[in-house]
Amino acid sequence: MPPEPPVPPSPGREDPYAPVRTRGYAGLLVMAALLGVPVSAIAFGFLALVAELQSLTYTELPKALGFEGTPSWWPLPLLGAAGLLVGTAVRRLPGGGGHRPAEGLVSTGAPAPADLPGIVLAALVSLGAGAVLGPEAPLIALGGGVAVWAANRLRPGLAPDARALVGASGSFAAVSALLGSPLLGAFLLMEAAGLAGPMLGVVLVPGLLSAGVGALIFTGLGSWTGLGTYSLKLGEVPRAADPDVAEFGWALVLGVAAAFAGVGVRRLALALQKRVERRTVAATAVLGSAVGALALVYAETSGRDGSEVLYSGEHELGGLLSGSAAYSVGTLLLLIVCKSLAYCTSLSCFRGGPVFPAMFVGAVGGIALSHLPGLHPTAGFAMGVGAMCVAMLRLPMTSVLLATLLLGKEGLTVMPLVIVSVVVAYVVTLRLAPVPVDRRGPEAV
């Protein structure tokens, strides 16, 4: 039987993998690997500076002023003053302080070099003063902006598509070790950018290369400096039992509850953001003080440290899971309320990322429900993390991976439960979201 003749390409259809076969793409891979080194080092320095600022503002400064410890009221004036600085940076500096976290984790491309100082300043003050946000969004912007700036210096006249790819690779490198795995950071950026089809591979390969190099740099700098890697990880993880029918029922409950909670936090944050935009500096200072007041209420009511309400919460996840027996149901419920309100308030005015606080709120909710029959704390923790993440971020694959890889081998045991809770939360969240209005008119249909 004679071989069939080759099928000619369809008219107007381009080969989506053509860029990969070019010499220029190989050059971009080399550039991505080389740029991964300085970008990841800058990202490591940013995280180290945030940690130092947090220690300075909440430990060293009170001590220098004569206090034996940090007073429970300390966050109130500190976050108010931080609000003045952040509001001024957002209002006066180019770039508006960067990504507005109340709008979710969205990909807007690499910022211009002139925008980077304002983005870094707003994020450093926000995170250093204890705003309830994470560092991932500023790192994504910083990594992409630095990579594009450096690429333009190395190869002037770089094509727009190549600049976009280099910027994405820089962002990959910047968050390579933050979430505990370079692969997890890659999934986060891919879902946030909405990449699919052939373009996924075109962008993913240099991004993964930069992420791998970045993870090595993070590890090396952490060991050399003795500061650690600032990577998301848990210490002791209680052993999880095999899932049963009761826990699958709890997965449905957690998914629905997280969807309503996430939509509520997001809507309140967006409503507050509209008011902040009218008087940015004053409103940010007032809302900063409100975050500090929530920490004060929690500390005075529960007798625990108000820092559990502040910050992004990733460093407290391990202690929360291993020491869950030390929290009463009332304390957990109070923590959920105060942390959620501080979270949506921070989303509306400060600068940072939405991922880690969503994980913390979901984890507290899952552990609170584990006090009821039929739910193991480890399973509740994992399902809460995944469900709340997808409710806030609408990134289902990333949410499943965050919740399961975080628990190590125990994550494999609870993965079916996490998938159910994430899918339920994702579908309910989309059902609760307003339907986009097509304003093009009937002639566009």
Image: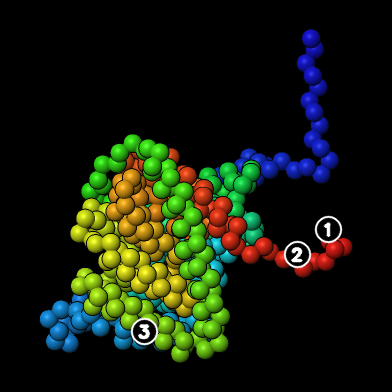
Compare marks 2 and 1 and give the one earlier in the sequence: 2
SS label for mark 2: loop
Badge count = 3
Q: Residue furthest front?
A: 373
Residue 333, position in %: x, y? 33, 65
Work out how far the residue at label 2 is from the one at label 1, CA to CA, in angstroms: 10 Å
Instruction: Give the labeled residue for mark 3.
Output: 289
**Which residue does the numbered mark 2 point to in the structure image?**
438
- Mark 3 and mark 2: Cα distance apart in space: 40 Å
Whether residue 170 is visible here, answered yes or no, is no
* Residue 116: mark in rendering: none
Q: Is residue 67 visible?
A: yes
Q: Residues within 10 Å of mark 2 (few under 14, many from 20)?
A: few
Q: Is the residue under label 1 in contact with that under label 2 (CB below 8 Å)?
A: yes
Q: Mark 1 Cα within 10 Å, few/some/many (few <14, many 20+)?
A: few
Q: Earlier in the sequence, mark 1 or mark 3?
A: 3
Q: CA distance from mark 1 to mark 3?
A: 49 Å
Label 1 element class: loop
Q: Is residue 430 left or right of residue 229?
A: right
Task: Tell me if 223 is positioned left or right of 259 in this view.
Answer: left
Q: Which residue is mark 1?
A: 445
Closer to the camera, 213 or 228?
Answer: 228
Amino acid under disc 2 = Asp
Which percent across, then down, holds residue 70?
A: 19, 79
Please name the amino acid that badge 1 sits on: Val
Relative placement, left or right, of 307 versus 131 is left
In percent of the image, x 44 and y 66: which residue is there? 353
Q: Nearer the viewer, residue 290 or 247?
A: 247
Q: Residue 66: x, y in percent?
A: 14, 87
Question: Image quadrant for the C terminus?
Answer: bottom right
Residue at 28% over, 74% down: 298
